[in-house]
Amino acid sequence: MKILRTISQTQNLTSKLRSKNKIIGFVPTMGFLHNGHLSLIKEARKKADIVFVSIYVNPLQFAPTEDLSRYPRDFKRDEKLCKDAGADYIFYPSDEMMYPRGFSTYAVVEKLTSGLEGKIRPEHFKGVTTIVLKLFNIVQPHFSVFGQKDAQQAAVIKKMVKDLNVNNKIVIAPTIREADGLAMSSRNVYLTNEQRADAPYLYKSLQYAKRKIMLENYNRDIDFLRSQMSKLIKSRKTATKIDYISFNDYDTLEEIKSLKNFKFDKILVSLAVRFGKVRLIDNIVIKR
Ligand code: PAF
């Protein structure tokens, strides 16, 4: 496995690989890898001749109030994990390389970014789509793998790729969970023991909604489900604030207020909850 630190080196290599008809699979990450990321790399490995992983903590997707400098980093550990998971190359650029002085062009997906995470973190998706489009232009993958854990990010990237005719297939891989149901996330390392013990209640509350809709055919207002989920989460004393619990159409992210007469293929139930300073997100997709 090789580490590539420059854009020109990476673009030259991927152009050559493409000219030799090699299938390039790509997994963009911000490092501090966990089993969730490794499952994305393994997914890419199944279908690609060459697997690229990028490791770059993108300053553009952090608000000034979010502590970018506190984001966990450990490149040596990431390098070993990537190698063991079957990656061929890591693209590992510097800030100066990605955002040179005078940088002033952005990719923005409208509408899909106005609710959920976009409401709480208004500039976040502009940062995500800009860096992801840049990475696509550098790595030139045939397909890229993202996790279902960041459901809105996945929907936004799919939309950007469609609207801007980016020649790259987006593959969404399932959320990987700890044995007690907590979704794997780089942020989990910040949880205290007490918070860690309470955090699986997020998944428990999502499963409650799924059970009500799928097994009990619940078909009334969403407010009732939301308040029951909220009660369950608030029963844990380290869950300090629920930013949102939301029911949306999986593809359009349109908010669903009632299930009465509502015909759906897939509902996305998502939430964001703060445990002190640690903010966790999770979601579940309900299919019919
Ligand atoms: O999901 C992430 O880790 C990041 O948002 C991504 C896609 C690597 C862009 O910085």
Image (cartoon, grey):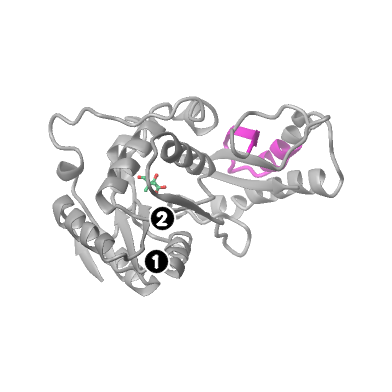
x and y, in percent, of residue 260 in the image: 83, 29
Q: Using the rendered image of the protein, determine whether residue 75 is visible from the camera's viewpoint.
A: no
Label ID, residue 48: 1
Q: Is residue 154 above or below residue 88?
A: above
**Residue matched to label 2:** 143
Image quadrant occupied by the N terminus? bottom left
Q: Nearer the viewer, residue 99 or 62?
A: 99
State which region is magenta: 228-249
Residue 230 part of the magenta segment = yes
Determine the residue located farthest toward the right in the rendered image.
216
Q: Residue at x 16, y 44 (%)?
A: 97
The answer to whether mark 2 and mark 1 are in CB contact below 8 A is: yes
Would the CB of label 2 be found within 8 Å of ligand 1?
Answer: no
Would you say 69 lies left or right of 156 here? left
Describe the element under mark 2 as helix, strand or loop: strand
Q: Is residue 215 above or below residue 258?
A: below
Of callouts 2 and 1, the N-terminal one: 1
Describe the element under mark 1 as helix, strand or loop: loop
Q: In the rendered structure, which amino acid carries the disc numbered 2? A: Phe
